[in-house]
Every structure is written in C-alpha cells, then in structure tokens.
C-alpha cells in the first residue's frame, strides 16, 4: 500500500474512534453506578413507591450521546429506566460550558471541555463556538425525544401542561414529564434578551452560575466567588417576570445572600448537599437552608459523594433528615445529579431503594411522598407561568 494511503487510513480510523467510540466510553466512565445487585426494596416499600409521584430536580442527560427512548447500560437516565423507577417528572438540565480540571474549589473561566464533547458527538457546527446554540441544540434534543416517544414523554412549560399531565398519568403510569433547566447563564452570552430566547425554547428553571464565575456573579467554585453583579440583578428581574425558577446550585455564598435579598419568588437549589452532614465548598450552610425555605423553595439533595459524603444511601437519608429537623420536610426534594459526571448508588430505575431507605429511617409515608416528588410538584404548580 502506498504511504499516503496508509496515512489516510490511519487518519480515517482515528477519526472514527474519536466520533464513534470515544463519546460512549467517556459517558460510561463519567457516569458510573455503584449498584448493589443483592438489594431489593421490601415489598411494602415497593408498594408505597409504586403509588408516589416521583420527581427529580436535576439530570444532565442531554449532554450525552444517548437515545432517551432506548434503555442503555451506561449512565443513569433513559425513558425505560425512568418508567421502571416510577419517575413521573424529570428536570433535564443543560450544561453549555465546563472547565478542564473542574473541581469544587477554584476554576477559571478560560477553558472549556464541552467544546471537545460537542465536536466528538457531532453537534451542529454553530454549537462548537456558541454557548447559546448549545443550549438550543440540547433543548431540541428533548423535543425530538418527545416526538419519538409514542406519547410517553411530555414537556411541561406551564401550569396547564402540568395539570393535564397529572390527570393523564393517573391512567397511565408509564407517562413521564420533562422540564427544561439550564446550569449557568454564561449561555446568555452577555445579552439579557437571551433570557427570552431560552424561555421561548421551553426553559423554566435557570441557575445563574455553574463551576466558574460569570457575568451574573460568583460560583462556589470560581476564582472571585463574588455576589450578584448589576447584570445579574437585571437577569434575576427578567426571570421573575417570566416566572422562571431561580436555581441557586453552585452559587457562591455571597451570590446566594444577594439573590435571597433580591428575589421575590420561591428559590430552589436543584442539586446540593448541606454543611450540617457534609462540609464542602458547594454545600449549603444552615442559614442558606433557612433562607431558601423562607422563600418557599426547595433543597434538592444530591446522590453523590461530593454532596452527601457517602457513596451509598445513608448519606442521602442523613442529609434529608438534617434538613427536615432544620426547616421541615416540605422543603426537601430529590436532586440526584444523574448523568452529571458523578457516581451514584443507583440509576433512575433504582429509586425504589431510596423510598425503602427513607421508610426504614422512620420517615412517614406522607413525608416520603413529599420528598420523593410531592414538594416539587407543589412548587412547580405555584411557580410555572399560567
């Protein structure tokens, strides 16, 4: 074989590996499950779980090259596993930028590993350079999944959508609702009118920051970790006018303080831990738990070690028990961070394990129902646009 043909063949094979093999491998490595194959929920717990409205506040599924309508052996979420876990509602959050070497302590904003992932997964060329295009592309992925779901996946944008879905699901437990969220409003690209663009695309929950500081304010993992900027205040006002839920996940303490003072609507923390059971730079202090509760909002307890200082169920239950004692069970929700580059003790199909663990820890059936989804349903019903 001629040398140039050998070289061309090597290039073709390398590209094939990059575009076909690399993304699934990365997905599997970044989103593992620590399954206990011997664990089975008690029959009573499974029966309780089967009658719950289960709702989770945070999954990064849309970042990964998976068909939502097909069952997969990697990652945490797909429609079959949501159905198996009796999940009625899943918040699908969108990531548009993430720094290389990301950590919970200190990240600069001058690098981005999502660009490589976008190229490897063959996203549209526009998304390689535009954070807004990445947000719109991932939203479109959810709509396409809905269209291909044969009526099983619904997307919630307002109260009417939610009410109709709840009514329909009473007759069909395989129905799943999705709510679009975004993790970090650097995706606005400095233009406040892009709040309206995201709203028109269906986004109903937005976190001002992610893993680095941006134009709105400081991240708990940023360099400056500052408070709300003037642009950030404008965005918060626009979000409230649009009835978009404000998500304080990843916000610096100063940013949380400023938004607690500035906001007039319920605030949520979609995926977090609490300092009372797991000290860490991204977890909430007691004062911030109280502040979110006073707003009428929710604390979404995460399922991974960085949030609960445990790789199993005990840390999740301990965090929920702590929040219950501090402010009450009505402010607790699920904040799994499924598919968020974390290891979780189970995937979406394994959520009956959490119901079992909560009942075993002494939570009442009513309390479990509120934690597992009733509280989020209530807050969405109160916060979504008409």
Image (cartoon, grey):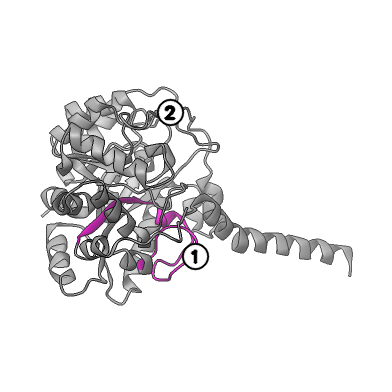
User: Residue tagged by mark 1?
Assistant: 73
**Image quadrant assignment for residue 311:** top left
Is 367 part of what is drawn in magenta? no
Q: Residue furthest bottom?
A: 150
* Quarter placement of the N terminus: bottom right
Crowdedness near tag 2: few (<14), some (14–19) or many (≥20) residues, C-alpha within 10 Å: many
Residue contact between numbered discs 1 and 2, judged by CB atoms under 8 Å? no
User: Residue tagged by mark 2?
Assistant: 222
User: Would residue 307 be found to the left or right of residue 364 on screen?
Assistant: right
User: Residue 78: image x %, image y %?
Assistant: 39, 64
* Quarter placement of the C terminus: bottom left
The range drawn in magenta is 52-79
| Residue 269 visible to the viewer | no
Q: Nearer the viewer, residue 283 or 195?
A: 283
- Give the main secondary structure of the magenta stretch: loop
Is 70 part of what is drawn in magenta? yes
Q: Is residue 310 above or below residue 158?
A: above
Q: Nearer the viewer, residue 265 or 379?
A: 379
As helix, strand or loop, the secondary structure at mark 1 comes to loop
Q: Is residue 106 above or below residue 138?
A: above
- Residue at image x 89%, y 67%? 2
User: Residue 343: image x %, image y %?
Assistant: 46, 48
- Residue at image x 15%, y 65%? 166
Depth-wise, is mark 1 or mark 2 nearer the camera? 1
As helix, strand or loop, the secondary structure at mark 2 comes to loop
Q: Nearer the viewer, residue 230 or 117?
A: 117
């Amino acid at each position: 074989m001629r040398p140039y043909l050998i070289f061309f063949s090597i290039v073709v094979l390398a590209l094939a590996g990059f575009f076909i093999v690399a993304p699934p491998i990365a997905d599997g490595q970044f989103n593992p499950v620590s399954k206990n194959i011997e664990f089975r929920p008690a029959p009573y717990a499974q029966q309780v779980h089967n009658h719950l409205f289960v709702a989770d506040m945070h999954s990064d599924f849309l970042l990964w090259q998976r068909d939502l309508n097909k069952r997969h052996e990697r990652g945490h979420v797909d429609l079959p596993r949501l159905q198996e876990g009796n999940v009625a509602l899943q918040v699908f959050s969108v990531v548009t930028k993430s720094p290389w070497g990301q950590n919970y302590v200190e990240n600069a904003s001058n690098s981005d590993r999502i660009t490589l992932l976008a190229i490897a997964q063959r996203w549209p060329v526009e998304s390689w350079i535009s954070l807004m295009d990445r947000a719109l592309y991932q939203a479109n992925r959810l709509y396409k999944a809905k269209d291909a779901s044969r009526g099983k996946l619904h997307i919630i944008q307002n109260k009417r959508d939610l009410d109709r879905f709840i009514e329909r699901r009473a007759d069909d437990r395989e129905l799943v609702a999705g709510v679009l969220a975004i993790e970090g409003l650097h995706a606005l690209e400095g233009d406040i009118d892009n709040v309206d663009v995201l709203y028109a695309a269906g986004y109903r929950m937005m976190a001002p920051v992610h893993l680095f500081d941006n134009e709105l304010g400081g991240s708990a993992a940023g360099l400056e970790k500052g408070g709300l900027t003037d642009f950030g205040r404008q965005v918060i006002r626009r979000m409230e006018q649009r009835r978009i839920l404000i998500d304080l996940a990843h916000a610096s303490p100063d940013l949380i303080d400023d938004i607690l003072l500035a906001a007039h609507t319920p605030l949520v923390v979609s995926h977090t831990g609490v300092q009372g059971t797991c000290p860490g730079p991204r977890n909430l202090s007691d004062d911030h738990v109280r502040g979110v509760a006073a707003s009428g909002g929710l604390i979404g307890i995460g399922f991974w070690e960085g949030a609960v200082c445990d790789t199993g169920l005990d840390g999740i239950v301990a965090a929920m028990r702590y929040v219950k004692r501090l402010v009450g069970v009505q402010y607790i929700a699920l904040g799994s961070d499924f598919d968020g580059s974390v290891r979780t003790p189970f995937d979406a199909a394994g959520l009956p394990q959490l119901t079992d663990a909560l009942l075993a820890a002494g939570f009442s059936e009513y309390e479990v129902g509120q934690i597992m989804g009733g509280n989020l349903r209530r807050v969405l019903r109160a916060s979504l646009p008409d």
